[in-house]
Amino acid sequence: AQKVTQAQTEISVVEKEDVTLDCVYETRDTTYYLFWYKQPPSGELVFLIRRNSFDEQNEISGRYSWNFQKSTSSFNFTITASQVVDSAVYFCALSEGVDYKLSFGAGTTVTVRA
Amino acid sequence: KAGVTQTPRYLIKTRGQQVTLSCSPISGHRSVSWYQQTPGQGLQFLFEYFSETQRNKGNFPGRFSGRQFSNSRSEMNVSTLELGDSALYLCASSIFGRNEQFFGPGTRLTVL
């Protein structure tokens, strides 16, 4: 069964628009971690954020913000005032318990047009 | 601090051959994980090593193997290559006690 679902395959926006990426996860563990990674065309996965299951506080980091809601098993990611450099594939991932194994979603391709 | 390095970056092999990929983690990181990325299957976990011991293994055939050395460097080996093994192989490292993983640039393997 898919543990992480990213329903949006592709999103295309014009520069300065906001972009919200959806992520829904599934786990039976009470302790788990959620992650967002960015994969630019160069191919390297860039770590953006980690959240544990006991910390539902939302976070803002510059133009990035994350909304974690355990009640709906969602961990959504918003890019505010998007820029062309934000164009990449974004992956949501889950690790369970003390496991380091990451289960990734299928990814959402974000294209920001000038 | 230098990031995760992987060698080689690109590799072309033919069916039936074997291949060894290398990964050097970030200095001080003792956990190394490997992932396979393909257009059809996405990102899939291969295995994870810590202190030279395999701690976790994904659902891949026995043709895929790995090891970790005392300096935390890791290698993965794929024997009897198949066309479907063509993929980007990503290595990631983590510091002890924290599970955020930092990825290398990957090795792109093409099997002809």
Image: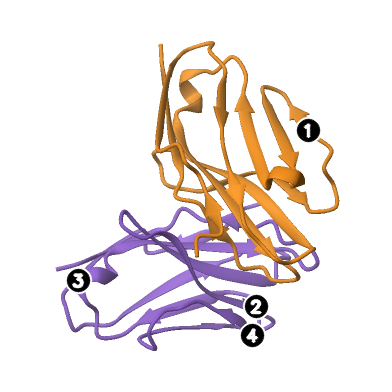
Chain colours: A orange, B purple
Quarter location, residue A95 = bottom right
Element type at mark 2: loop
The quarter of the rendered structure image containing the C terminus of chain A is top left
| Residue A43 higher or lower than B74, as above or below | above
Q: Amino acid at mark 2?
A: Asn
Residue A80: give x, y in percent of width and height: 62, 18
Q: Nearer the viewer, mark 1 or mark 4?
A: 1
Three-letter code for the amino acid on which mark 1 is drawn: Glu
Residue B71 numbered tag: 2
Which residue is tagged 3?
Answer: B83
In the rendered image of this protein, does residue B24 appear above or below residue B52? Answer: above
Q: Residue at x 41, y 79 (%)?
A: B60
Say which of marks 1 and 2 sits in front: 1
Q: In front here: A8 or B88?
A: A8
Q: Which residue is mark 1?
A: A59
* Mark 2 residue crowding within 10 angstroms, few (<14) / some (14–19) / many (20+): some
Residue A106 can be seen in this image: yes
* Host chain of mark 2: B
Q: Are marks 4 and 3 on the same chain?
A: yes
